Structures are given as structure tokens and as C-alpha cells.
Amino acid sequence: MDLTCPNYMCYTAANRLPLRYLWDDTRASRDFVSDPSPVLEAAGPISVRARMALCIALYEWVMWRFDGLHDDPAPRQFLQAAWCASVDPRTIRFFELERNAWIGPVRGPLWCAITWLRAALADGDAKPAETIDGLQYLTRLALHTVPQPALLQQWLAAVLPRLLRHHPHRPDDLFADLLGRRIGAHRGTLVGRDVFDPGLSYDLPGADHWIEELLYQSRATSNPYLAL
């Protein structure tokens, strides 16, 4: 499945450069100025899986922002693995990107985005705080690096109600899986990528079909981050 840059991001060669944000790898998030609390509050009543998918969507804002400014396949490969991991965390391999190879105003933000998203997806079931931390960090990182922060804010205002409408949090049966064998099954209904495009209609059967196609096609790839 071809995961291409969504049109709603409105990225162009002209607005990707020059880079107009402050980046220092030794400071990381200390230069971020945005407040993620409205996003965290709005994400409170949505399902665990929807929060994880929102983390992926925010990662996409960062990843596609730097498209064409580097030649490393890792960010796109990780995107595919991340969407698969939104279904089941066991589909994503454990890995650590070498920090010294991911520095500077382009690769530095990508390293941060990948690192925080992997933890949110792989560890969020046992440690829900990892998903919340990933959501707040990726929100701040995206708002810090995108060329049009107001456009990202408008997008958040549009998609957060969609997530609540289609993927609200529902209490889980604590006795349905006492041995913890149904990993990822307590996250809520599957989330399709189209829910994040305000210009597209969205339904749950369509989301299931998209996920099925994604998993089927991903099995035929040599993605180093996938364990399918």
C-alpha cells in the first residue's frame, strides 16, 4: 500500500525550505513553545487505539514535512510499521536508531518523532503513559517544525471531533483477558487513515478494509521494522 503525503498538509518544495525553526540537538524539546494540553484534553474521551493513531498522524506531519530533504528510507519504512503496530504491537520490531547518525535540523526531529512514536505504540498497552507522553511530544514537535502551524491547528480542530464521533473510548471488560494474551485487543475498533482527512468521508467498515490491505501488502515487503 502506497502511503503518500496527504493533500491536506499542503506541503510544497517552496514551503519546506528554508527551515525557519530553532533546532539544537542538545536542547530538544526545551525550544518548543506550544501548549499540547488542549489536544490531550480532547483526546481523553477517545479510544486507546485512536490516541495511538493520532500519534501516527502527527508523526506523518513531521515526516512528510522533511520529505525530499534527506534520502534515508527509514522514516517511510517506520510509517508503514507504525500503522501495522496500531493493530497489534507485536508487528513492530524492537530497535534503537543510532543517535549520532540522526542529528541536525532535519534528521534530529525525525529521530525524535520515530523514538517517541515507537514507544507510544509498542509500550502503550502495558504503560498507557507512554501513549500520552508520545501524544504531547509529537504535538509539540509537529507545531514547532511545520511551516504552517496554523494549518496544523485547524487540522487538529477538525479531526479530534471525528475521532470522538467514530472512535470513542468504551470501558473494557477487565475479566475478558485475565492472562493478557489478547495483546492490542483492548484498544478499541480499528482506525483507518482516512479519519484524519477532513475532506473524506469515513466509516468503520472502510477502516477495517484499509487495515486488512495494509497488513496484506506489508507482509510482502522487506521492511526492517516489521515483524510480520
Image (cartoon, helix red, strand yellow):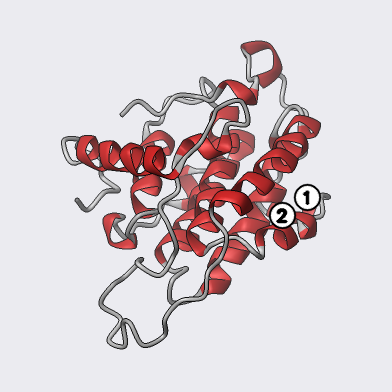
SS label for mark 2:
helix
Q: Residue at x 63, y 14 (%)?
A: 12
The x, y position of residue 116, in whole percent, is 53, 57
Check disc 1 and report its element: helix, strand or loop.
loop
Q: Position of residue 60 (x, y in %)?
A: 54, 37
What number is the disc on residue 71? none
Of 17 and 178, the residue lying toward us = 178
Q: Quadrant of the N terminus?
A: top left
Residues at circles 1 and 2 in contact by the CB criterion of under 8 Å? yes
CA gap, disc 1 and disc 2: 5 Å
Residue situated in front as seen by the camera: 10 or 166: 166
Left/right of residue 22 with respect to residue 166 in the rendered view: right
133, above or below 216, in the image: below
Residue that badge 1 annotates? 32
Can you see residue 187? yes
The answer to whether residue 15 is left or right of residue 171 is right
User: Extreme top residue here?
Assistant: 14
Give the vertical position of 216 relative to 135 (above or below).
above
Residue type (three-letter) at the residue carrying disc 2: Ser
Q: Nearer the viewer, residue 77 or 48?
A: 48
Q: Residue at 70% x, 17% y: name it.
A: 15
- Residue 93's image quarter? bottom left
Q: Position of residue 191 (x, y in %)?
A: 45, 48
* Residue indicated by mark 2: 29
